[in-house]
Image: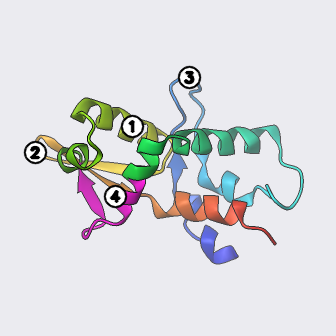
Amino acid sequence: MSRSCRYAADVVIPASTDNPASLNVAEICSAPLLHGLITSSQAASFARVLKALADPSRLRLISIVASSVKGEACVCDLAGRLGLSQPTVSHHLKILARAGIVSRHRQGVWSYYAIVPATMEALSAALKAK
């Protein structure tokens, strides 16, 4: 479905500090994971995003942020809902942000996080079976 990829060219996912190269969401979107062979670069792109998602606390964070009334959530509210310390929640959110799954903006001393739709759409499109 091409509609899933319409924002892909506008978003660059920062890679982890272990690998300074940037990852374009279009690379994920164009990868035929369930439709054929993928390149090494495409595999690395998928792995980076999937690795960030491969944690129960991070999946819960994504769920909470995505279901927030305003479409964003304050780190101060997330810690209590997960039963984790604020530094632990901030660590998980940092990993999700590096993978391009969430975006962050600051208001005063607090950080607010929102889901990056282009990343989720691109991942969904790439994993979708024919």
**Up-down: is 128 above or below 51?**
below
Q: Type of residue at label 1?
A: His
Q: Type of residue at label 4?
A: Val
Q: On the rendered image, what quadrant is the N terminus found in? A: bottom right
Mark 4 element type: helix
Q: Which residues are magenta?
A: 62-74
The crowding category of the residue bearing disc 2, from other C-alpha atoms within 10 Å (few below 14, some 14 to 19, many at least 20), is few
Mark 3 element type: loop
Residue sitting at the far left: 108
Query: Where is mark 4, residue-wise?
Result: 65
Of marks 2 and 3, which one's residue comes earlier in the chain?
3
Q: Nearer the viewer, mark 4 or mark 3?
A: 4
Residue sitting at the far right: 36
- Determine if the magenta segment contains residue 66: yes
Disc 2 to disc 4: CB gap under 8 Å? no
Task: Give the image quarter of residue 8.
Answer: bottom right
Mark 1 element type: helix
Query: Where is mark 2, residue-wise?
Result: 108
**Up-down: is 59 above or below 19?**
below
**Up-down: is 108 above or below 2?**
above
Q: Nearer the viewer, mark 1 or mark 2?
A: 1
The image shows residue 17 at horizontal and vertical percentages of 50, 25
The crowding category of the residue bearing disc 3, from other C-alpha atoms within 10 Å (few below 14, some 14 to 19, many at least 20), is few
Q: Type of residue at label 3?
A: Asp
Query: Where is mark 3, residue-wise?
Result: 18
Mark 2 element type: loop
Residue sitting at the far top: 18
Query: Where is mark 1, residue-wise?
Result: 92
The image shows residue 65 at horizontal and vertical percentages of 34, 58
The crowding category of the residue bearing disc 1, from other C-alpha atoms within 10 Å (few below 14, some 14 to 19, many at least 20), is some
